[in-house]
Image: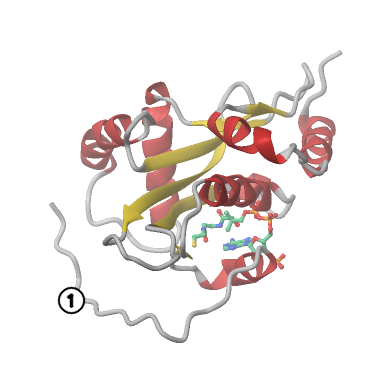
Amino acid sequence: MRLHGDAALSLAVQLLSEPLSWPVADLRIATECSITYHQSMARVRIRLARPGDSSALADLRYRFRIETVPATETKSRFLHRCIPWMRKRFRSGSSPWRCWVLDDGKQLLGHICVQLFEKIPNPVNEPEFHAYVTNFYIVPEMRSHGLGKRLLNKALSWCRARGTDAVILWATPGSKSLYHRCGFVESTDVFELRDGVRQPH
Ligand SMILES: CC(C)(COP(=O)(O)OP(=O)(O)OC[C@H]1O[C@@H](n2cnc3c(N)ncnc32)[C@H](O)[C@@H]1OP(=O)(O)O)[C@@H](O)C(=O)NCCC(=O)NCCS
């Protein structure tokens, strides 16, 4: 049986709403592999991005950024530099980048990325990586069904399994409630210095 439209969406959301529970020992393995919320008809799943996703990811990146800020670069020019950038960063292995995508079997519906960055070694009991969460996006027609929270939790599980110290991000105004629900607090001690507007390439 194949479901389409709202029926498929509601099944996918229901499947994604099932609590994910792994034995602790399996967490690391599970976060490295894809997890299929498996039903033949609604193949919505969260998985690690592959080099072959780079075009779709760059396209979504463009859609994401121009939703709120006008582009200063043509789409084709942007894709030309973003696709190879993503292909190189999101091939796991030793890259500090990870990207998870929401895949319905035909197209990507969203994504989230994490970059681990090193701290200087220290002699106290403190983890030596921070994590930067970025490029968090769900296509507009799939929003507010809990998919963003699932993707975010996936990325946070991976950070936790790596014993990161702080997980940081810059929140858009509309997304703050979601971050609060996932345990984030707004920092009182991070300083930010911005040096004017970035020039287009
Ligand atoms: C933020 C986003 C990834 C969340 O995905 P989602 O599937 O809608 O999230 P969920 O259904 O799990 O949770 C809903 C929450 O998403 C956030 N949200 C919903 N629509 C949003 C929008 N247009 N812009 C920003 N955040 C939004 C809200 O925090 C909402 O919680 P609320 O209902 O209490 O206000 C998605 O809304 C999106 O892509 N927004 C535009 C891009 C963006 O702002 N990304 C975050 C960058 S920090």
In the image: residue 30, left or right of residue 62:
right
Q: What residue is rendered at 49% in x and 47% in y? A: 162
Give the percent coordinates (x, y) of residue 185: 57, 76
User: Is 158 left or right of 43, judged from the image as shown?
Assistant: left
Residue 19 percent coordinates (x, y): 81, 44
Residue 39 versus residue 130: which sits nearer the camera? 130
* Residue positioned most to the bottom: 188
Q: Quadrant of residue 89?
A: top left
| Figure disc tally | 1
| Residue placed furthest toward the top | 1
| Residue in the image at 76% along x and 23% along y | 38
**Residue at the extreme front of the image, as rendered:** 123
Amino acid type, residue under disc 1 in the picture:
Asp
Element carrying mark 1: loop
In the displayed structure image, the side of residue 16 where residue 196 appears, left or right: left
Question: Mark 1: few, some, or many residues within 10 Å (few <14, many ≥20)?
Answer: few
The quadrant holding residue 99 is top left
Please name the residue shown 39% across and 68% down the image.
Answer: 124
Would residue 169 appear left or right of 119 to someone viewing this image?
Answer: right
Colour scheme employed for the rendering of this structure: secondary structure
Q: Find residue 32 and report its horizontal and vertical position in percent.
A: 53, 31
Disc 1 under 8 Å from ligand 1? The reply is: no
Query: Residue 42 sits in which quadrant?
Result: top right
The N terminus appears in which quarter of the rendering?
A: top right
> What residue is at 18 percent from the left and 65 percent from the top?
198
Q: Ligand 1: which quarter?
A: bottom right
| Residue 90 pos. (x, y %) | 37, 34
Relative depth, front residue between 122 and 22: 122
Q: To which residue does mark 1 refer? A: 195
